[in-house]
Amino acid sequence: MADSITARHRLRVKQRRRVVDFAEEYGLRAAARHFGLARRTVRTWYRRWEADGEPGLVPRYPARRRRRVSDGLVELARVARSEYRWGATRTRIWLERVHKIRANAKTIHRVFRDLGMPVLTKTPRRRPKQLKLFEKEAPGDSIQVDVKVIKVKREKVFQYTALDDCTRLRVLRLYRRQHQSSSLHFLEEIRRTLPFPIKKLQCDNGSEFPVTFKLAVEAAGIKHRYIKPRRPQQNGKVERSHRIDAEEFWSRNDFETVAAAEASLADWERRYNHERFSMALHGRTPIEKLHHVLPGVVPPDKQLDVQ
């Protein structure tokens, strides 16, 4: 075999040489029938062999095959990775649900690679001590409450967050102070906003949730639970939602005033509950999960009451 043939093509050339030898002895039609090939293919190989010998049997595949995805899909994939910082799986769901475009996750990943989009950096995580994952069966069975510290033009403000364990439905409010009065006010906001009764509420042992807050929760007919000290994973769902807030809301906005941040946070709450699909909910939004487990509680086109 000629030295000019690369190692990766030698087997293919050897196979084609057998077809050519058979065709030379018995004819093109017999070779095509014997090897199960189209007569045109056998004829092409035979002519290349006559002209160039064995190097003529080297496969002549194009250096780059024509792209089978549309330019529109490529542009949407670019937006998903560069602006939203989504991976292939979330991009696939977004394309199918929002733009009615079906594409395989492997295809989307290949588009990312062809576009030269940078690989998403993974956020380092602590190994949780609570490894068993769980989800409450009904809305209101457990509401996780936590506080996230935010800076708006060097002023420290506090985002109070309540998240329903079953549906991931959230209530967000912004306060200038992190103390008992803010917590009590937020409790009333939770009860007023969520469209289902609350059975249990849990929070950490921060000074903003003193015994007075616990008594107010129990006076409303709601069970209260403090999570164990230094166990934020017991409030894992609301902690995870705070990371989403940091990546998809606060890092993408620069507010001049606290009032502007408060108004925008209300819109973000609506989008999170009604438009942002969750991988934890198998591609559904929190409001869709609520309609699934409690159909008819809130009309699909009615938004939750936000300020």
Image (cartoon, grey):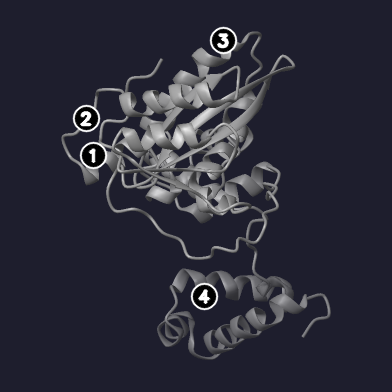
Which is more N-terminal, label 3 or label 4? Answer: 4
Task: Tell whether 74 sits left or right of 200.
Answer: right
Q: Type of residue at label 1? A: His
231 or 16: nearer the viewer: 231
Q: Is residue 55 above or below residue 80?
A: below
Residue on which disc 2 sits:
298
Residue located at (37% from left, 28% from top): 190
Disc on res. 198: none
As drawn, is 46 to the left or to the right of 142?
right
Above or below 82: residue 230: below
Q: CA distance from mark 2 to mark 4?
A: 68 Å
Q: Secondary structure at mark 3?
A: helix
Q: Are marks 1 and 2 in contact (CB under 8 Å)?
A: yes
Q: Residues within 10 Å of mark 4 (few under 14, many from 20)?
A: many
Q: Residue at x 51, y 22 (%)?
A: 182
**Residue 31 placement (x, y as % from top left):** 47, 84
Label annotation for residue 260: 3
Query: What distance separates the C-alpha of mark 3 from that of mark 1?
Result: 31 Å
What mark, if any, has residue 291 been given in the picture?
Answer: 1
The Cα atoms of the two marked residues, 2 and 3, are separated by: 28 Å
